[in-house]
Image (cartoon, rainbow, N blue to C red):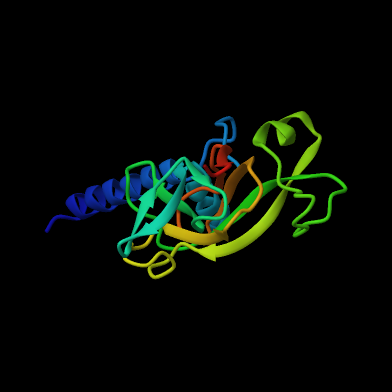
Amino acid sequence: MPKTMVDFRLIAALLVTSSLAACSTPSPSAPSAPPVAVQDLGQRASADASGLYALSFNVWTGGSLQQVSSLVVGTQEMILMAHVTGSAGAPAQKGTAIFEYCSYKGVPPNDITRPDEAPKEACAQGTADWARLATVSVTAGTCPTLGTGYSCVDFGVVRIPRDVGFRFRYSPQGSGIAAGVSDAQNFTWVAGP
């Protein structure tokens, strides 16, 4: 092979290599994005995954839960049920539902003669605060016959007619669904006949 031919190939290879190296280093005048840690990416993905947080009131009827909006005092136990799904409808596989009720300030809990439970409007106005009732996992088994994404807690039998505000907060614990709070709702107990 003639010497001029080898020199031409060597020069061409050096030019291509130097061009690639020049493209791989950022230009001093080009803006650069701040580095993002891998942990930050996971937190951003979790925070961007919106969820749906549905609260319902139920009673046991014939071995299954039936949704209700009110009960006669002293008749049945009311079951609070939280249902958490991602925005696409897939149920939460991890996390907990923190059930809360609206509680009047300065009134002791569990006093049968002076109930501390208040309607949701009292919490909105600041005359009451949200009090923790229970923290329950949203994994399978916490609501009998229902799969993951559901969480249930038995509020019990109420003996004094009143409206009580309830809500739940969702703690994702790595589920990929963002933390959130359900809409507050009142449940009504009415006097019997």
> Can you say whether 29 is above or below 51 in the image?
above
Residue sitting at 38 percent across and 41 percent down? 87
Report the side of 153 relative to 60 (left or right). right
Residue sitting at 21 percent across and 55 percent down? 6
Q: Position of residue 57 (x, y in %)?
A: 47, 48
Residue reaching furthest front?
Answer: 193
Report the side of 89 relative to 162 (left or right). left
Report the side of 156 relative to 11 (left or right). right
Report the side of 156 relative to 4 (left or right). right
Q: Position of residue 64 (x, y in %)?
A: 32, 60
The reply to whether residue 129 is in sight is yes
Q: Quadrant of residue 164?
A: top right
Residue reaching furthest left?
Answer: 1
Residue situated in front as seen by the camera: 2 or 77 = 77
Residue situated in front as seen by the camera: 10 or 37 = 37
Q: Quadrant of residue 140?
A: bottom left
Q: Position of residue 93 (x, y in %)?
A: 40, 62
Residue sitting at 59 percent across and 35 percent down? 28
The reply to whether residue 35 is in sight is no
Q: Position of residue 125 (x, y in %)?
A: 76, 29
